[in-house]
Amino acid sequence: MRLMSAIYLDHNATTPLLPEAWEAMRDVPPGNPSSAHTVGRKARQALEDAREKVAALLGAFPDEVTFTSGATEANNIAVFGLHPTLAFASHIEHPCVIEPLRQLESRGAVVEWLPVDARGVIESRSLAPQADSLVCIMLANHETGAIQPVRDIAMSLPPGAMIHCDAAQAVGKIAVNFHELGATTLTASAHKFGGPKGVGVLLVKRGTQLKPLTYGGHQQHGRRPGTEPVALAVGLAAALEVAVGHLDENHAKLETLRARLWSELQQMCSPVVLNGPEIGAADVIPTTLNVSFPGCRADLLLMALDLAGIACSTGSACSSGSLLPSPVLRAMGVPDDVLRSAFRFSLSATQDEAEMSEAATRIAECVGTIRAT
């Protein structure tokens, strides 16, 4: 049996920890940042330095930055904390936004589900928000990479209406400016851009009333009480600084890699279908390539790819274990044979074109084998 090196094509699920983040975390003082002694004050300084760095990199004020355990917690704090009686969202949102909204529905709130077009972009024509209503719209989709018109929708809202933006797949991959987007709240997760797992960020616009999910501490303006994870916050800030500092060069390289993988899959795996914005489109993050292989069962192909050393997914890492058809692609109106053979390949700027060619070759071999059975 030929031993093959692994090719990791699941960077939307999680990314390797950047060495810069690890080095920054190693030097963090051990104290509790709420302690008054010298060690505690040093930890507090490290935490606040990280907060200021994150704010500057994301176009926010430092007092708008709250550190959380990740985007899932941050999205829950935002949705429940804003506590709308009327909300708008689409079925392309991540489950950690959709499920809190369903909980609000069960408690009497009205949630209107908006359609998306065939490219996976939200259609806002039926959007009729009122004062105190909430619009939930992600910045970049986790399965197709489609960038959503957050700023356009934010600018069209009436006074008093709020907008929550899950930016977990966008931060560190495209330029994100909280104030320019016009969002009320915005979330991100460190491990999506080379930071440590277990830490995320929630941005809350100044003056916003946000009810906390938990109680028992004064930390972070009471929005997320509890001892702050100083080392993780420092690692997040360090990784974000690296990612933002290389946005343009990484974007250009990733576009080349994505185009190369798609071109070779077309040549070797026909018929193959692209799900989401076309190659080279401006409104897509270049890390993400969602394709379908009609005639292949996704569960069988996923196992074959794993044995061939290809790490990829059939959708969101939070839901793909079930192997159920993607709700994102279903919302886009993707036909059943395409829907049930869809895969997400997500890339890193640390990879190269030779690796994309090798990946395409292995994928084509697996596809051919499954189609022949």
Image (cartoon, rainbow, N blue to C red):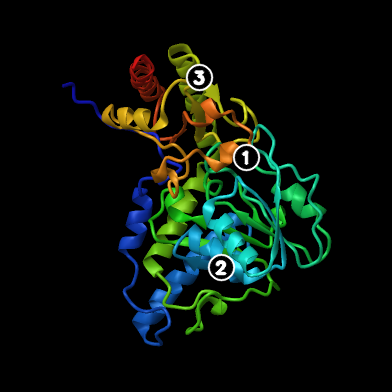
Q: Are marks 3 and 1 in contact (CB under 8 Å)?
A: no
Residue wearing tag 1: 331
85 w.r.t. 317: above or below: below
Q: Going by the picture, which residue comes out furthest to the bottom?
A: 36
Three-letter amino acid code at the position of disc 2:
Ile
**Distance of mark 2 from mark 1, alpha carbons?**
26 Å
Provide residue 81's location: percent of width, then percent of height: 61, 71
**Mark 3 or mark 2, whichever is nearer to me:** 3
Query: Could you tell me if residue 336 is visible in this image?
Result: yes
Provide residue 241's location: percent of width, then percent of height: 49, 52
Seen at 43% across and 82% down, the residue is 34
Q: Going by the picture, which residue comes out furthest to the left?
A: 1
Residue wearing tag 3: 272
Quadrant of the rendered image containing residue 163: bottom right
Query: Could you tell me if residue 61 is visible in this image?
Result: no
Three-letter amino acid code at the position of disc 1:
Ala
Work out whether mark 3 precedes mark 2 in sequence or the reverse, and give the earlier one: 2
Q: Are marks 3 and 2 in contact (CB under 8 Å)?
A: no
Q: Residue 77: which disc? A: 2
